[in-house]
Image (spheres, rainbow, N blue to C red):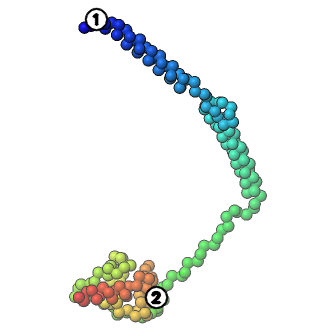
Amino acid sequence: MFEGWGFLLGEIWVLIALAALLGLFVGWLVWGRRAAPVVQGGTGKGEAERLQAELDACQARARDCAARVARLEADLSEARAAIAVPVEPVLPMPEEPAPVSAGEAADVGTKPATLEAPRAGQADDLKRIKGIGPKLEALCNRLGFWHFDQIANWTDAEIAWVDANLEAFKGRVTRDNWVAQARRLAAENKR
C-alpha cells in the first residue's frame, strides 16, 4: 500500500518549491518594479526631499515676517517718540447725582398709612413680591408696612414717597410693580 509514496512525496516537494518561486517572481513584478513617486514639477525627488523643500520655504517666509515685524515695531517706536501727547485721551469722570437728604426724601409724595406692628402679631411674607428680599422686607417693616393690603392701596403720591424713602432701593416700587403684585397676593389671602 505504501510502495509508491516516495515518488509522490518528492513530487509534492518539487511542486511546493515551484509555487514558492512563482510567488516570489510575481511579488517582485508587482511590488519591486514600482516607479519612484513623482513630485510636483516631475523632478522625481522622494517624499523626504519634497518635505524638506517645503520646510525650507516655510522657514524663509518666517524669517521675512520676523524682519517685517521688527521694521514695523521700529516705526511704531519712532512714531510714539514723535508724539508729545499721550496716546489715550483722558476722559473726565461722570458726575454722580447729589444724594437726597432725609428731609428732601420726606418732601416727595405723600406718606402712606403705616402700622406700628403687624395686625394680630402676624405679618404677611412681603418677600413673595418680586423684588423684595430679606433686607428690603426689613426696611419696609421699619417704615411701617407689614401687609399686602397696605401696599395694594397705595396711590401714585404714596408710591413716590415710598420710592424716595427706600434708602439704597429707591425706585423699586415702580420698577417691580409692587402694587399690582400686592393686590393679587392680598386677594389670595382673602380666600
Q: Amino acid at mark 1?
A: Glu
Residue nearer the viewer, 100 or 15: 15
Q: Which residue is mark 1?
A: 3
Which corner quadrant holds the N terminus? Answer: top left
The residue drawn where x is 64% and y is 37% is 55
Q: Earlier in the sequence, mark 1 or mark 2?
A: 1
CA separation in Å, label 1 and label 2: 130 Å
The residue drawn where x is 58% and y is 77% is 95
Residue nearer the viewer, 30 or 87: 30
Q: Quadrant of residue 14?
A: top left
Percent position of residue 38, x then y: 63, 33
Q: Quadrant of residue 87?
A: bottom right
Point out the frontmost of discs 1 and 2.
1
Q: Which residue is mark 2?
A: 105
Percent position of residue 62, x then y: 67, 42
Taking 13 as reference, is 139 above or below it? below
